[in-house]
Image (cartoon, grey):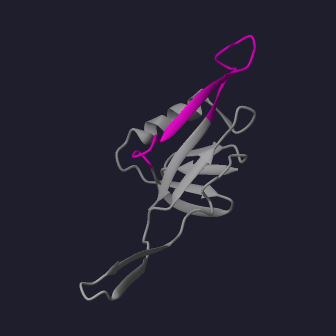
Amino acid sequence: MITLSDGTTTLELPGDFDWPDEYTWQSVVQDAGYTLTGALVVETATKQAGRPITLVGADDRAWVTRADLEQLRTWADIPGQELTLTLRGTSYTVLFRHQDTAIDAVEQILFVEDPAAGTYYSLTLRFMEI
């Protein structure tokens, strides 16, 4: 189970989202350049924040209801909204990555009597750890 909370409201998300950028983050940043004398200058530091966390659903799993999608949109529409994401037993303080598309949603319709009850969405959620 994955949870997302603003401290007041907690949203439970399916636990079968993929996290494709889990191991692409590098906490070390480095810059190298040459001085006018030709000497190499290397500066290295640890990044303080900004780790991307992208959660990707699929057409056959990790679906959310329309109500859950509306809650996600509500949070995404608040500039600077900090959320606590609990994923794989670890909690992260995150913001939506608005420099990318924060939320991609694709409607998945189940054929049931009440169309509203059968409307689910597969999602891609883009966060950054702060």
User: In the shown orientation, is residue 65 left or right of residue 46?
Assistant: right
Using the image, determine if residue 12 lies above or below residue 121: below
Residue 25 lies in quadrant:
bottom right
Residue 44 lies in quadrant:
bottom left
Image coordinates for residue 52, horizontal then vertical, percent: 51, 57
At horizontal 48% and vertical 56% (from top left) the residue drawn is 128
**Residue 74 lies in the magenta stretch:** no
User: In the shown orientation, is residue 96 left or right of residue 61?
Assistant: left
Residue 32 lies in quadrant:
bottom left
Image coordinates for residue 22, horizontal then vertical, percent: 62, 60
Along the line of sight, which residue is nearer the eye, 44 or 60? 44
User: In the shown orientation, is residue 38 left or right of residue 61?
Assistant: left
Start-end of magenta stretch: 97-122
Using the image, determine if residue 30 lies above or below residue 2: below
Image coordinates for residue 21, horizontal then vertical, percent: 60, 56
Along the line of sight, which residue is nearer the eye, 67 or 96? 96
Along the line of sight, which residue is nearer the eye, 36 or 29? 36
Image coordinates for residue 89, horizontal then vertical, percent: 68, 62
**Dividing the image into 4 quarters, which one contains the C terminus?**
bottom left
Q: Total label count?
A: 0
At horizontal 64% and vertical 57% (from top left) the residue drawn is 87
Q: Residue furthest front?
A: 38
User: In the shown orientation, is residue 108 left or right of residue 8?
Assistant: right
Using the image, determine if residue 99 lies above or below residue 69: below
**Residue 119 lies in the magenta stretch:** yes
At horizontal 44% and vertical 36% (from top left) the residue drawn is 74
